[in-house]
Image: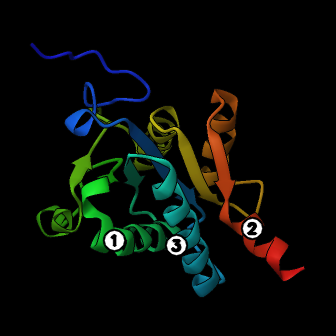
Amino acid sequence: ETDNMQTKNSPVGGGVFGLEIYRVAFIGHREVDEHRQVADELDTVLSMLLKKHEYIEFYVGKNGEFDELAASAVRRLKSEWSAFCSLALVLPYEIANLDLIEKSYDEVIMPNDYKCHYKAAIEKRNRWLAENCDLMIIYIERENGGAYKCYKYARELGVQIVNIADKIHNEKQ
């Protein structure tokens, strides 16, 4: 007997082998200035999270440098801790070479099952990320754009948020 009811903490009906699943989404600006610092900060935050949670599902897009840095950080973590985390690519629409790209992820999710303008599709995907995570790790330095809009929506929903850009700028001071 399976429980198909989806709850906020358990999108796969009870988790992986009965483990509690903690869901982390990444969102950020397309361009990232300080690649090395962002990568280091992501490594620090992700390893801290892994110490606190039994199993983590990481959700990442493919719309810019922060998404790439986040996916790389999760892959570094998975190289040692693959039994305790997974990496899902969350796409707003079909993309070219998906058959090749999806080999780098544990799962590909396309929450938009409707046809709409690509910018609207990205916004809908971002809303899905906000609605389906316990923690959102963001890289936001300015108060405009799709990443900022998604961050504001996640905040309205009461999602816990860590801004990597703030952490880096606080360390510089």
Q: Quadrant of residue 111?
A: top left
73 lies above or below 99: below
- Which is more N-terminal, label 3 or label 1? 3
Q: Quadrant of the N terminus?
A: top left
Query: Which element carries disc 1, helix, strand or loop?
Result: helix
Kindly identify the amino acid type of the residue bearing the numbered disc 2. Lys
Residue 117 at what x, y percent from top left? 40, 43
User: Which numbered circle lies on residue 32?
Assistant: none
Q: Which residue shows up at 58% across the image and 64% down it?
A: 45
- Which is more N-terminal, label 1 or label 2? 1
- Which is more N-terminal, label 2 or label 3? 3
Q: Quadrant of residue 155?
A: top right
Using the rendered image of the protein, determine whether residue 167 is visible from the camera's viewpoint. yes
Give the color scheme: rainbow, by chain, secondary structure or one colour.
rainbow
Q: Which residue shows up at 49% across the image and 44% down it?
A: 126
Q: Which is more toward the observer, 123 or 78? A: 78
Q: Which residue shows up at 38% across the image and 21% down it?
A: 7
User: Which numbered circle lies on residue 43?
Assistant: 3
Which residue bears the numbered disc 1?
75
Residue 80 at what x, y percent from top left? 31, 72
In 3D space, how far apart are the residues under numbered discs 2 and 1 (Cα atoms)?
A: 22 Å
34 lies above or below 113: below
**Tags 3 and 2 touching, CB below 8 Å:** no
Q: Quadrant of the C terminus?
A: bottom right
Q: Residues within 10 Å of mark 2 (few under 14, many from 20)?
A: some
Kindly identify the amino acid type of the residue bearing the numbered disc 1. Arg
In 3D space, how far apart are the residues under numbered discs 3 and 2 (Cα atoms)?
A: 13 Å
Which residue bears the numbered disc 2?
167
Q: Which is more toward the observer, 19 or 6? A: 19
Q: Which residue shows up at 64% across the image and 41% down it?
A: 160
In 3D space, how far apart are the residues under numbered discs 1 and 3 (Cα atoms)?
A: 10 Å
